[in-house]
Amino acid sequence: MDGDPDTGQLIPLLMLGALVGIIGGILMALFTMLATATYLQVGFFTPLYAIAAPLIGRQTLLASMVHSGFYFTLGPALLGLVIHLMWSAFWGMIFGLIARRLHLTEGVAIISGLIYGLLVMLVMSFIVVPIVGAPDLLRLVGTLSFVIAHALFYRLPLGLWPVAQPQFFTGLTTRQAV
């Protein structure tokens, strides 16, 4: 971003990226948890236990899958949620930087957010998850549910962000962008 006259917007952009990423992460987590509790019948909190498993072991995850329903253990669920939201914030900040660099707005931003969600899904599923030794959520949740969760619930908020606040992405002031 050398020579960019609006580098003063970088910190607010990153903070908003983290916030929008977290919002998308919450929506994705809720959708995934509802999917696992309803039609997958492996327990509401199972995705959170799967995320926490590399740090605490798989005992809670396996118990959740056996008992299904609403098996709940506060520590592992909270740890899984925090890890998920930290990744969500990270990917939100990265999207903000990319969208700013490419000056994404309007429909292009929305489509880019959806595509970005799928790319994040691939990176997390095939690179990060195997490296950290986490259970394969793609298989656990199902491909269709995982794609919907990443594309729509996780990244649609990111794609809508440049539409709602184009001043961060076009180089225009708020007044000029409207």
Image (tube, rainbow, N blue to C red):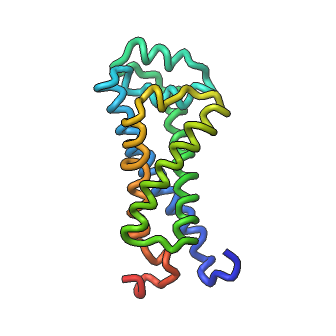
Which of the 4 quarters of the picture holds residue 34? top left
Front in this rendered view, residue 124 or 75: 124
Relative to 9, is 3 on the left or the right? right
The answer to whether 73 is drawn above or below residue 116 in the figure is: above
The reply to whether residue 49 is in sight is: yes
Q: Residue furthest bottom?
A: 176
Q: Residue furthest right?
A: 2
Front in this rendered view, residue 7 or 143: 143
The reply to whether residue 164 is in sight is: no
Residue drawn at (39%, 55%) of the image:
156
Q: Please state, as top left, top right, bottom left or bottom right, where the N terminus lies in the image.
A: bottom right
Which of the 4 quarters of the picture holds residue 83? top right
Residue drawn at (48%, 56%) of the image:
19
Relative to 8, is 66 on the left or the right? left
The answer to whether 40 is drawn above or below residue 176 in the figure is: above
Residue drawn at (37%, 36%) of the image:
145
Residue drawn at (62%, 38%) of the image:
128
